Amino acid sequence: MKPKDKAIELLDKYSNKSIECNEGTEWTYDKQCALICVDEILESFNYLEYYPEDLRDYWQKVKQEINKL
């Protein structure tokens, strides 16, 4: 899956769970939740002895795509 597609998928998952707020606030909340999720994934790489470098790069790109949305 391309990083942009994964970014959209994560936002979609959180958009169904967020509390309806003022217009525009909900999307910001969804982005924050998705970014927290990706940050946790990226943090987990610090505790692994081995991981494919391209996997970390992939999640960095997903984070960039979330920030663009």
Image (cartoon, helix red, strand yellow):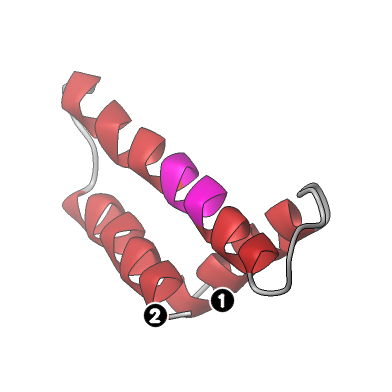
Disc 2 target residue: 68
The spot of residue 18 in percent (x, y) is 76, 49
1 or 2: mark nearer the eye:
2
Residue at the spot 55% in from the left edge and 63% down from the top edge: 28
What's the magenta region?
32-37
Q: Earlier in the sequence, mark 1 or mark 2?
A: 1
Disc 1 target residue: 5
Q: Disc 1 vs disc 2: Cβ atoms closer than 8 Å?
A: no
Residue at the spot 44% in from the left edge and 42% down from the top edge: 36
**Does the stretch in magenta take in 4?**
no
Structural distance between the alpha carbons of marks 1 and 2: 12 Å
| Quadrant of the rendered image containing residue 15 | bottom right
| Quadrant of the rendered image containing residue 3 | bottom left
Secondary structure, mark 2, is: helix
Secondary structure, mark 1, is: helix
- Binning the other alpha carbons within 10 Å of mark 2 as few (below 14), some (14 to 19) or many (20 upward) gives few
Residue at the spot 43% in from the left edge and 51% down from the top edge: 35
**Does the stretch in magenta take in 35?**
yes
Residue at the spot 52% in from the left edge and 68% down from the top edge: 7
Amino acid beneath label 1: Asp
65, above or below 35, in the image:
below
Amino acid beneath label 2: Lys
The answer to which of 57 and 19 lies nearer the viewer is 19
